[in-house]
Amino acid sequence: LLLRVGTPPFVAHSLMPRVLAALRSLSGDIRVELTEGGVPSLQRALLDGKLDALVTSFASDMAGAAGLRFERLYPTKVAVVAASSHPLAGKRQISWATLAGQPWILPPRDSRVRRFLEGMFAQAGYVTPTPLIESSNPITNLRFVAAGLGLAAVPQECLKLVEAPEAIASLHLRRSLPEGTLALVYRTDMAHPRLQLFREALIQIGRCHFGR
């Protein structure tokens, strides 16, 4: 009774412990094999039959993928953060011009957060800064931020997992970041027998923690 699920690191850290606990309460017989990684590689693994489902941030380019179904789950936001000691911490109406002149810690180019941030810089008329540090794990990136190594863009859910939350400050931007969506993704040609229970666990956590 194995269910193979893929998630980016921020989902694995922030959401999956609660979802898997809910799944266990629904059925103690299901074993879960969890794979963390970048969304493009996870999507390929799903299409190749190496995974049964993904839980990931939804992007419009994914919707065009043949053979996949997307069920929207919860809202998700990206936060731009700095060390609490950073000169921008506590300031209001921070412009993208100001952000463009800062050192950054960013995930790889194929990540959703990186592409999201590049789109925001482009809309403001700026090129995304070349990162001082490139790292795929948002929890690691938050530690770099706390150490004063630069700014980062991370899923807001990850801020709850910071060991020393007082060391991190969310920046107040002049143009707020749009809300995204977390989605359950699976193949249309292969209905996994345990997928419905996994869906129910996701919905249960959504009702408890997101009011949906």
Image: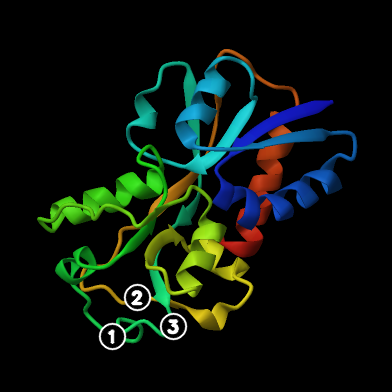
At x 59%, y 70%, the residue is 162
Q: Which mark is residue 210?
A: none
**Nearer the observer, 129 or 66:** 129
At x 84%, y 26%, the residue is 1
Secondary structure of residue under mark 2:
loop
**Spot occupied by residue 37 in the image (x, y as percentages of width and height):** 56, 38
Instruction: Determine whether 54 is above or below 88 in the image.
Output: above
Instruction: Tell whether label 1 touches label 3 (CB within 8 Å).
Output: no
Secondary structure of residue under mark 3:
loop
Q: Which image quarter holds the C terminus? A: bottom right
At x 90%, y 40%, the residue is 28
At x 13%, y 58%, the residue is 124
Judge left or right: residue 195 versus residue 118.
right
Disc 3 from disc 2: Cα separation:
10 Å
Let me know if residue 187 appears in the view: no
Q: Which amino acid lies under the numbered mark 2 shown in the image of this protein?
A: Leu
Instruction: Determine whether 86 is above or below 98 in the image.
Output: below
Residue annotated with mark 1? 91
Instruction: Tell whether label 2 touches label 1 (CB within 8 Å).
Output: yes
Instruction: Determine whether 67 is above or below 89 in the image.
Output: above
Q: Which amino acid lies under the numbered mark 1 shown in the image of this protein?
A: Lys
Disc 3 from disc 1: Cα separation:
11 Å
- Asked which quadrant contains residue 46, the reply is top right
Q: How is the image coloured?
A: rainbow
Q: Which mark is residue 84?
A: 3
Of the image marks 1 and 2, the number of the one nearer the N terminus: 1
Residue annotated with mark 2? 171
Disc 1 from disc 2: Cα separation:
7 Å
Most extreme residue toward the right is 28
Judge left or right: residue 101 versus residue 187.
left
- Asked which quadrant contains residue 89, the reply is bottom left
